[in-house]
Amino acid sequence: MQPAREQILIINDEPLVLEMFECFFRRENFEVYVTCSACRAVDLVKICSFSYIICDVDIGGENGIDLLEKIQKLGQSPQLFALSESPSMFEMLRAKKLQITYLSKPVSLEHLSQSIQDRQRENFHYNENNNTIAEN
């Protein structure tokens, strides 16, 4: 029996970007979900257990950081990534406070994949028994 693939949700209002990300992360062996709707994203989070969520900061007039904050309040703890074409210091600081990895566009798929791998390594070293980072 093969181990379950990690689930990733990609939220972006540009269909070509969704298609490109979906193809890339399927090749990276993720179970990929995509949506261009903030409401649909919340619905998916309620029924799926995502390891990672990648969200554009501007989703058709909605704020992606607000959406990711709403998702955090649902009680799951996926690793969150926000992508912004025009980063603002306010949004960057807000993302940091919410423990969201904030990346400026254009971002290469390889760089995004590396950021996910970095978060995977951070989680690997996290010791859930005493809520501390393990020493290397």
Image (spheres, rainbow, N blue to C red):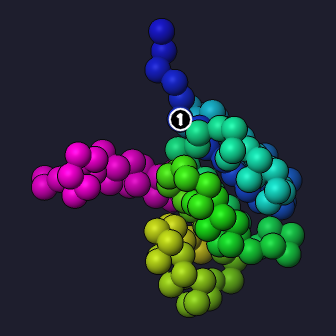
> To which quarter of the image does residue 104 belong?
bottom right
Q: Residue at image x 59%, y 39%?
A: 49
Please state if 100 lies on the left or on the right of 35 as rendered: left
Q: Does the segment drawn in magenta span residue 118?
A: yes
Instruction: Determine whether 130 is above or below 92 in the image.
Output: above
Residue projecting furthest to the bottom: 89
Number of callouts in the render? 1
Q: Please name the amino acid that badge 1 sits on.
A: Glu
Vertical order, 14 against 24 (above or below): below
Vertical relation: 12 (above or below) 106: above
Observer able to see residue 68: no
Q: Name, please, the residue furthest toward the top.
A: 1
Look at the picture and state if 41 lies above or below 22.
below
Of residues 24 and 60, the one drawn nearer to the viewer in this rendering: 60
Residue 62 located left or right of residue 99: right
- Foreground pick, 113 / 10: 10
Residue 67 in picture, x, y percent from top left: 70, 66
Q: Which residue is at 53% across, 44% downward?
A: 51
Where is residue 68 shown, x and y percent of the image? 64, 64
- The secondary element bearing badge 1 is classed as loop
| Residue under pointer 1 | 6
Q: Residue at x 61, y 55 (%)?
A: 74
Q: What residue is rendered at 47% in x and 76% in y?
A: 96
- Horizontal side, residue 36 vs residue 97: left or right: right
The magenta stretch is: 111-136
Q: Position of residue 52 (x, y in %)?
A: 55, 49
Q: Position of residue 47 (x, y in %)?
A: 69, 38
| Quadrant position of residue 24 | top right
